[in-house]
Amino acid sequence: MSQHKYVLDQLDETRMLSSKPLDTPMDPNQMLMVDDGDVLEDPEKYRRLVGKLNYLTVTRPDITFPVSGVSQFLSSPRSSHCDAVIRILRYLKGSSGRLLLYCDHGHHWVEGFSDADWAGSHSDRMSTIGYCVFVGDNLVS
């Protein structure tokens, strides 16, 4: 499954088709904070873009964690949050051809993994959880 055209449409809509691609969807050294940066003039534009990125996570599990991170600031997005969204788009620019391929190797077991931190968010001390589910060798969630 691929959403190559959808990625290109989002890059075109945001005028980022000529932007320099990045190798990672988020900066591992950056912590997004609630009051980091200036308040955006058009927060609705931010919300729409994050919603479109969230839709893209169906076939691009590699952006699920950073999209989840920027989704935490939908009520009052700031410039630093917008910069993080732009970074995700620049990552997608360099990896727009990636696809999700399901193969049938005769293995039909379901296996799940999860992990969590404890109060890892510096802004509100909330915990972060993550999980993945495989059917055979295929990542499905």
Image: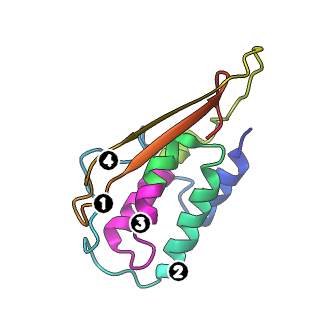
Q: Position of residue 4 (x, y in %)?
A: 69, 45
Q: CA distance from mark 2 to mark 3?
A: 14 Å
Q: CA distance from mark 4 to mark 3?
A: 17 Å
- Residue 70 among those drawn in magenta: yes
Label 2 sits on residue: 44
Q: Nearer the viewer, residue 35 or 21?
A: 35
Q: Position of residue 36 (x, y in %)?
A: 25, 71
Q: CA distance from mark 1 to mark 3?
A: 11 Å
Q: Residue at x 53, y 58 (%)?
A: 16
Label 1 sits on residue: 126
Q: CA distance from mark 2 to mark 1?
A: 25 Å
Query: How many numbered markers are drawn?
Result: 4
Say which mark, if any, is on residue 96.
none
Task: Name which residue type carries label 2.
Answer: Glu
Q: Is residue 14 visible?
A: no
Marks 4/3 in contact by CB < 8 Å: the verdict is no
Label 3 sits on residue: 72
For marks 4 and 2 on the same chain, the one whose residue lies earlier in the sequence: 4
For marks 4 and 3 on the same chain, the one whose residue lies earlier in the sequence: 4
Tell me the colour scheme of the image.
Answer: rainbow
Q: Residue at x 72, y 41 (%)?
A: 2
Q: Is residue 97 visible?
A: yes
From which residue to which does the magenta span run? Answer: 68-90
For marks 2 and 3 on the same chain, the one whose residue lies earlier in the sequence: 2
Task: Name which residue type carries label 1.
Answer: Met
Mark 4 element type = loop
Q: Position of residue 47 (x, y in %)?
A: 52, 73
Task: Name which residue type carries label 4.
Answer: Asp
Q: Is residue 125 left or right of residue 96?
A: left
Q: Nearer the viewer, residue 44 or 93?
A: 44
Label 4 sits on residue: 27
